Image (cartoon, coloured by chain):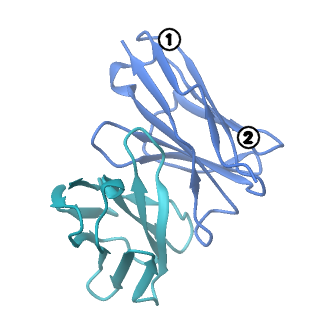
Chain colours: A cyan, B blue
């Protein structure tokens, strides 16, 4: 069964600090891996998309890394801001037919002033 | 260019009733997928529509059904509502299956079943 596990479940940091969120997956083979930011009560917004051949992808203060051998990805947030408070969701898209995405449960990030 | 719009934003229904949720896809997108997101959980894939046909379905019972119209907008219908159906229902549109170009999500419909 395809699974995506994220850690930590929740994280509290001070404004200006960096943090790293983790994503482990069992989806194989996969087409691409994505990180989304979801504000409370809103739909997810795409941060990064990486194919299996890419190791890193940046979007402003957000940098995602991917190790396809160990099936791990991370999302690093630099110089956090209060507006970064949200849920961050890792999504893996399989290849080879259905392309039905598997979502992680998300990491809830709270940035305090 | 318009994004994905969903209606209504909030809805309260009684157990056993039926509900229809609506989604207008982003301009230029031809595929719509629906997700159920319970509180504190990640979205769960319900099904996807491409060219008015269902072309992928998650682990949801038949009382969850859908439609896609020629303008690529879509409806999600849920019959015989149960308390556990209470969730945020997200619609996402994409070009093709979304595997290459990503999905654009709407803000969701918050359904409460009492």
Q: Residue at x 27, y 69 (%)?
A: A23
Q: Is residue A44 above or below residue B83?
A: below
Residue for point 25% across, 63% down: A5
Percent across and percent down for residue A36 are 43, 61
Q: Chain of mark 2?
A: B
Up the image or down, A97 lies above or below A108; here it is: below
**Residue B4 in sight in this render:** yes
Label 2 neighbourhood size at 10 Å, few (<14), some (14-19), many (20+)? many
Residue at disc 2, secondary structure: loop
- Residue at the front extreme of this rendering: A113
Which numbered tag is attached to residue A46?
none
Residue A106 position, x and y percent, is: 29, 55
Farthest residue in the right direction? B70
Of labels 2 and 1, earlier in sequence is: 1
Nearest the camera: A97 or B42?
B42
Up/down of A4 relative to A79, above or below:
above
Q: Residue B24's quadrant in the figure? A: top right
Vertical arrangement, residue B35 with respect to residue B17, above or below: below
Question: Which residue position is annotated with label 1?
Answer: B17
In the picture, measured across the screen, residue B68 lies left or right of residue A22, that is right
Q: Which residue is mark 2?
A: B73
Callout 2 and callout 1 share a chain: yes
In front of the other: A4 or A35:
A35
Name which residue lies at 49% across and 74% down.
A49
The reply to whether callout 2 and callout 1 are in contact (CB within 8 Å) is: no
């Amino acid at each position: 069964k395809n699974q995506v596990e994220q850690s930590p479940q929740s994280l509290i940091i001070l404004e200006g600090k960096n943090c790293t969120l983790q994503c482990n997956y069992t989806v194989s083979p996969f087409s691409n891996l994505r990180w989304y930011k979801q504000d409370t009560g809103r739909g997810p917004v795409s941060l990064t998309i990486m194919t299996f051949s890419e190791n890193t992808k940046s979007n402003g203060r957000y940098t995602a890394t991917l190790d396809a051998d160990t099936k791990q990805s991370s999302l690093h947030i630099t110089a956090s801001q209060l507006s970064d408070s949200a849920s961050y969701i890792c999504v893996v898209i399989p290849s080879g037919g259905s392309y039905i995405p598997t979502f992680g449960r998300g990491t809830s990030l709270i940035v305090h002033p | 260019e318009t994004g994905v719009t969903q209606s209504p934003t909030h809805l309260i229904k009684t157990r056993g009733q039926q509900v229809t949720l609506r989604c207008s896809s982003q301009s230029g997108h031809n595929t719509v997928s629906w997700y159920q997101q319970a509180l504190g959980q990640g979205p769960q894939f319900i099904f996807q529509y491409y060219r008015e046909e269902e072309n992928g379905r998650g682990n949801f019972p038949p009382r969850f059904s859908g439609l896609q119209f020629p303008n690529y907008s879509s409806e999600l219908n849920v019959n015989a509502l149960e308390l556990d159906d209470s969730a945020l229902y997200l619609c996402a549109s994409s070009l093709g299956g979304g595997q290459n170009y990503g999905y654009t999500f709407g803000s969701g419909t918050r359904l409460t079943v009492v």
